[in-house]
């Protein structure tokens, strides 16, 4: 079985945080679509909001996020003002007051705005949107910059979930990825957040990084689990040097091969399962009593740009450079180049650059792929009743023959070994990926 898995794990495929993936967006979706989708929002339905801050104090060599090194504070402040202006522009485009049920700050390192900057953006949001009582308010933080004053500011803003980028605790790995982060920094950040009452903590880890081994990752898992986060996202390192200049500084000779990556992913899962975490989807772990686990158990798990979520809302409004908004009928992504985004917004214009419209067939493909990514199964009569999928099912036959997949009538189910390559199964339902493999990362 390992030979077979290795074969599929070599394929370069999307992580399917959306379907179609952002790689398929085109400039044919423009401001007119965005305005129409905003205007037509059902104001009785709450929405989710994502705020993107594309700056960090320093760039990590492995980073695949849309971010850059912040050299000047006035540039960050201009960006914050653009975010606030965009919030006002979007507010103007809505046909009535809309409620926010979830708010997620991502990046980059959003706390680079400082507690005052974050509070200023929140005031902008509150002036244009209503908030649901007890809404989930999450932020991604770099543990090296979690100061006492930042934590105080976050509690005042009502932040109630934090994701900390832990990545790996081994000093040799940290040196190879350009991210020096003593474990003490993570422990101090956690202590400060918990003391301030922010108790929902997620950790991000990565496997497949330079110099990592199964043994080093087992140790990382042991150290990390001792701090008892509620959720752990453990991503396979996506090495895309063609797209990410910072990754070209990683010595490819130090990267684990595909077999090692398979072993690393399996070892991590073993370590966390042994310590009482539940595996969620392809790369998340959560405590048995966590809301993500409960959602997974109840078949209410979803996938969005942050990974797995129990957020079932259809509409996500993204603010900031490169952020993606999701509407019932399509996606729209803002300009990624930060100065161009700031310029457009400062001129009083919304800043979409590309996106895609979803017809009925694309929506059914999206539902099928989301179901596979969340539950390792898709009942095609439920997810895609109008599509026959003859070509797709024949493409999947080799995986059936290899024992990775069962097809019973119109129900497609990954077997236990097949779960680790569910991206390959999902890709069969995605006509776009049968093209240029260099755009995506390894399936494991
Ligand atoms: C916006 S960052 C998290 C917040 C903060 N900037 C930090 O690094 O602590 C989001 C997460 O994406 C993950 N990530 C970044 N680049 C990646 C890559 N090339 N492959 C896999 N995961 C990656 C990391 O785990 C990182 O914590
Ligand atoms: S991993 Fe986090 S801190 Fe490092 S460059 Fe990426 S966004 Fe910035």
Image (cartoon, rainbow, N blue to C red):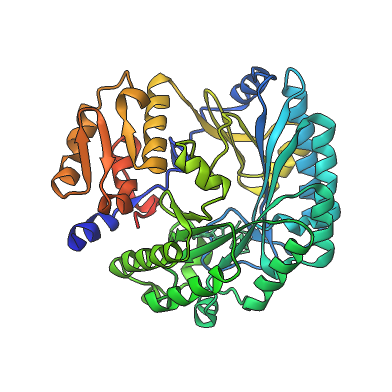
Say if residue 44 shows up in the picture.
yes
- In the rendered image, the vertical position of residue 413 relative to residue 12, given as above or below: above
Quadrant of the rendered structure where residue 397 is? top left
In the displayed structure, does residue 77 sit left or right of residue 333? Answer: right
Q: Nearer the viewer, residue 403 or 299?
A: 299
- In the rendered image, the vertical position of residue 267 relative to residue 347, given as above or below: below
Q: Nearer the viewer, residue 26 or 36?
A: 36
Q: Residue at x 32, y 64 (%)?
A: 262
Quadrant of the rendered structure where residue 268 is? bottom left
Q: Residue at x 29, y 43 (%)?
A: 425
Task: Give coordinates of residue 402: x percent, y percent.
Answer: 15, 50
Q: Quadrant of ligand 2?
A: bottom right
Task: Give coordinates of residue 441: x percent, y percent.
Answer: 39, 55
Which quadrant of the rendered structure holds the N terminus? bottom left
Which quadrant of the rendered structure holds the C terminus? bottom left
Task: Give coordinates of residue 253: x percent, y percent.
Answer: 36, 76
Q: Nearer the viewer, residue 246 or 308?
A: 308
Q: Residue at x 72, y 50 (%)?
A: 160
Say if residue 308 shows up in the picture.
no
- Tell which residue pokes out farthest to the left in this image: 401
Task: Give coordinates of residue 395: x percent, y percent.
Answer: 20, 38
Q: Residue at x 45, y 36 (%)?
A: 299
């Amino acid at each position: 079985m390992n030979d077979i898995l290795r074969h599929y794990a070599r394929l370069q495929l999307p992580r399917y945080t959306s379907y179609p993936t952002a790689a398929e967006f085109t400039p044919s979706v423009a401001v007119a679509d965005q305005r129409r989708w905003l205007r037509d929002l059902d104001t009785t339905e709450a929405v989710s909001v994502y705020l993107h801050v594309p700056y960090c104090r320093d760039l990590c060599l492995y980073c695949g996020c849309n971010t850059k090194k912040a050299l000047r504070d006035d540039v960050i402040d201009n960006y914050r003002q653009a975010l606030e202006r965009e919030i006002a522009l979007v507010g103007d485009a809505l046909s009535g007051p809309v409620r926010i049920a979830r708010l997620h700050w991502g990046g980059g390192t959003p706390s680079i705005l400082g507690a005052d900057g974050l509070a200023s953006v929140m005031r902008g949001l509150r002036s244009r949107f209503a908030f649901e009582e007890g809404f989930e308010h999450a932020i991604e933080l770099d543990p090296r910059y979690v100061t006492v004053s930042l934590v105080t500011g976050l509690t005042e803003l009502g932040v109630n979930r934090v994701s900390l980028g832990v990545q790996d605790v081994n000093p040799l790995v940290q040196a190879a990825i350009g991210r020096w982060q003593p474990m003490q920094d993570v422990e101090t950040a956690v202590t400060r957040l918990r003391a301030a009452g922010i108790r929902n903590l997620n950790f991000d880890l990565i496997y497949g990084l330079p110099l990592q081994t199964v043994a080093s990752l087992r140790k990382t898992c042991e150290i990390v689990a001792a701090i008892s986060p509620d959720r752990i996202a453990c991503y396979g390192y996506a090495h895309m040097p063609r797209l990410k200049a910072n990754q070209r500084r990683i010595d490819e000779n130090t990267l684990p091969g595909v077999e090692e990556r398979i072993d690393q992913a399996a070892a991590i899962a073993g370590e966390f399962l042994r310590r009482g975490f539940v595996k969620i989807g392809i790369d998340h772990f959560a405590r048995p009593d966590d809301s993500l686990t409960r959602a997974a158990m109840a078949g209410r798990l979803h996938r969005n740009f942050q990974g797995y979520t129990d957020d079932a809302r259809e509409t996500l409004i993204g603010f900031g450079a490169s952020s993606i908004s999701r509407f019932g009928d399509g996606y729209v992504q803002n300009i990624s180049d930060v100065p161009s985004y700031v310029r457009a917004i400062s001129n009083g214009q919304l800043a979409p650059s590309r996106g895609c419209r979803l017809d009925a067939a694309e929506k059914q493909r999206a539902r099928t792929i989301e179901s596979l990514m969340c539950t390792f199964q898709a009942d095609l009569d439920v997810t895609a009743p109008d599509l026959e999928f003859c070509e797709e099912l024949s493409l999947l036959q080799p995986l059936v023959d290899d024992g990775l997949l069962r097809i019973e009538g119109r129900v497609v189910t990954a077997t236990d070994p097949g779960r680790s390559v569910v991206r390959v199964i999902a890709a069969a339902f995605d006509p776009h990926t049968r093209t240029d493999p260099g755009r995506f990362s390894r399936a494991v």
